[in-house]
Amino acid sequence: DAGITQSPRHKVTETGTPVTLRCHQTENHRYMYWYRQDPGHGLRLIHYSYGVKDTDKGEVSDGYSVSRSKTEDFLLTLESATSSQTSVYFCAISDTDDSTGYTFGSGTRLTVV
Amino acid sequence: QQQVKQSPQSLIVQKGGISIINCAYENTAFDYFPWYQQFPGKGPALLIAIRPDVSEKKEGRFTISFNKSAKQFSLHIMDSQPGDSATYFCAAVDGGAQKLVFGQGTRLTINP
């Protein structure tokens, strides 16, 4: 999807374990976002980044942390996975700060058992 | 609390028919209203968008109708095709806060 790759595509993990999802972009876009998608809720913003080492919380940030040490990589960490974090996670990128044009990755399906 | 409310959750339309998905919002700070289309196993992709200074925008078979006073907007898909079968999300942007919020999504199925 237009220079944005998420890994892994699927993951099953046990409750209480840490998990890190990776978003890698080759577009050199400044803005990167992590969303989770759940039935009945649409997509909800977890965290976002507006530059290297510049991040902020979204509406559902509890239990998640992020890091961005390079322009191209944005990592999402579940510090201690819970069953409520079973979801499909999407990364998005944008080259503008007005939220008018996001490009999404293909998603990571995470199951916490 | 869902800032953008979308209906219906699922919709089945016959090939050649008109598909209509509706959304409503409360926040008057929203100033950009995109629609995203998502196929299974893929991320959402921007389909069409509108700003509140116009009441309608058309791109091919896809039309957004916007009613600013009612705080409602809708997506119309004319001559619906099986290839249009996907999940559709309305969304809204608060330009001041630079935040994009999504509706709950509508799973559209076009029967051949």
Image: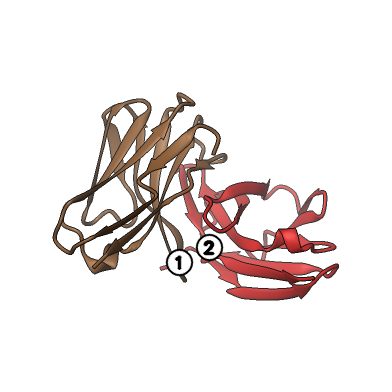
Chain A shade in the render: brown
In which quadrant will I find the N terminus of chain B? bottom left
Quadrant (top left/top right/bottom left/bottom right) for the C terminus of chain B: bottom right
* Disc 1 secondary structure class: loop
Q: Residues within 10 Å of mark 2 (few under 14, many from 20)?
A: many
- Residue B2 marker: 1
* B75 shown above or below A47: below
Q: Is residue B61 left or right of residue B29?
A: right
Chain B colour in the picture = red
Question: Is residue B8 among what the camera can see?
Answer: no
Label ID, residue B15: none
| Residue that appears at 57% across and 39% down | A101
Residue A28 appearing in the image:
yes
x 51%, y 58%: residue: B102
For residue B75, side relative to residue A62 (left or right): right
Image location of residue A12, percent across then percent down: 28, 59
- Tell me the chain of label 2: B
Q: CA distance from mark 2 to mark 1?
A: 7 Å
Please tell me which of labels 2 and 1 falls first in the chain.
Answer: 1
A24 w.r.t. B95: above or below: above
Q: Where residue B22 appears, x then y in whole percent? A: 66, 68
Residue A84 spot, x, y in % from top left: 27, 67
- Tag 1: amino acid: Gln
- Residue B21 x, y percent position in the rendering: 68, 67
Residue at x 37% of width, y 32% of height:
A50
Question: Tag on residue B103?
Answer: 2
In the image, residue A36 above or below residue B106: above
User: What residue lies at 47% left-to-right and 36% top-to-bottom?
Assistant: A4
* Kind of residue sitting beneath label 2: Gly
Q: Are the residues flagged by discs 2 and 1 in contact, CB closer than 8 Å?
A: yes
Label 1 Cα crowd, 10 Å radius (few <14 / some 14-19 / many 20+) = some
Q: For the residue labelled by badge 2, is the local secondary structure a helix, a strand or a loop? A: loop
